[in-house]
Image: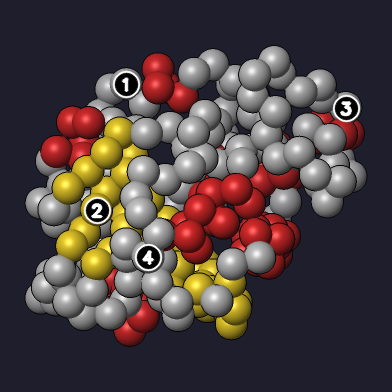
Amino acid sequence: MNDPRVSAQAEPDGLPGEASSDWPRGAFLRADESRDAEFYRLPRFVHHIDPGAVQALSRLYRRILPPDGALLDLMSSWVSHLPDDIAYRRIAGLGMNAEELAGNPRLTDWTVQDLNREPYLPYPAGSFDAAVIAVSVQYLVRPVEVFAEIGRVLTSGGPLVVSFSNRCFPTKAVAAWRVLDDRGRIDLVRRYFTRSGAWRDVTVLDGSSGDGDPLFVVTGRRI
């Protein structure tokens, strides 16, 4: 993370990203610092990972997420990749596009919110039994704040499942993500968990099916 493209950039007004000596200056800047609301204004009814990775993620959710639990689907869209045959008590979605969220048949309720501008979640403490962030963590400019907030709204022992592949919108991914390889990105997400102070049992899983997109998963449990 000593790449000059990361360390030489100035912080933009009003969007400082993670303010911490743990990160190189500019690590959480993006090539496109225009408002995310404009970037996500039009719905994208597409999968951002291939069918093999989608099925692998669904299998991991089956193993990790509590049946009949209350789930929080963060940075959500028109699909949640949850197992079709498992019922959950609540599936709350928080994302950027109202049309996509309204089109997601698994969500029981949803909220449009830009976590890069408002990293605080609109839910009481202990509202959920588990949370997921699917193939979107690379876009967070204040990830430690968001991970701490997720911890606040989960019950003790509740899992957070963060999945990602090697695809992204490069202009909206943070600089640190763009300059790291797969192993570096895994380590970066692990640091989000540990730096937020809300998680134990942080574990890396390889969900790749062996055919198609790789799928990397980092999980932790609420302290």
Q: Nearer the viewer, mark 4 or mark 1?
A: 4
- In three-dimensional space, the C-alpha distance between marks 2 and 4, rounded to whole angstroms, equals 14 Å
Numbered label attached to residue 98: none
- In three-dimensional space, the C-alpha distance between marks 2 and 1, rounded to whole angstroms, equals 20 Å
Pinpoint residue 164: horizontal percent, then vertical percent: 49, 58
- In three-dimensional space, the C-alpha distance between marks 1 and 3, rounded to whole angstroms, equals 31 Å
Q: Quadrant of residue 182?
A: bottom right
- In three-dimensional space, the C-alpha distance between marks 3 and 2, rounded to whole angstroms, equals 39 Å
Q: How many residues crowd around disc 3 within 10 Å: few (fewer than 14), some, or many (20 or more)?
A: few
First along the sequence among labels 2 and 1: 1
Q: Amino acid at mark 1?
A: Arg
Q: Quadrant of residue 200?
A: bottom right
Q: Is residue 3 left or right of residue 132?
A: right
Q: Is residue 223 left or right of residue 52?
A: right
Q: Amino acid at mark 4?
A: Gly
Q: Residue furthest front?
A: 124
Residue position marked by numbered label 1 in the rendering:
41
- In three-dimensional space, the C-alpha distance between marks 4 and 3, rounded to whole angstroms, equals 40 Å
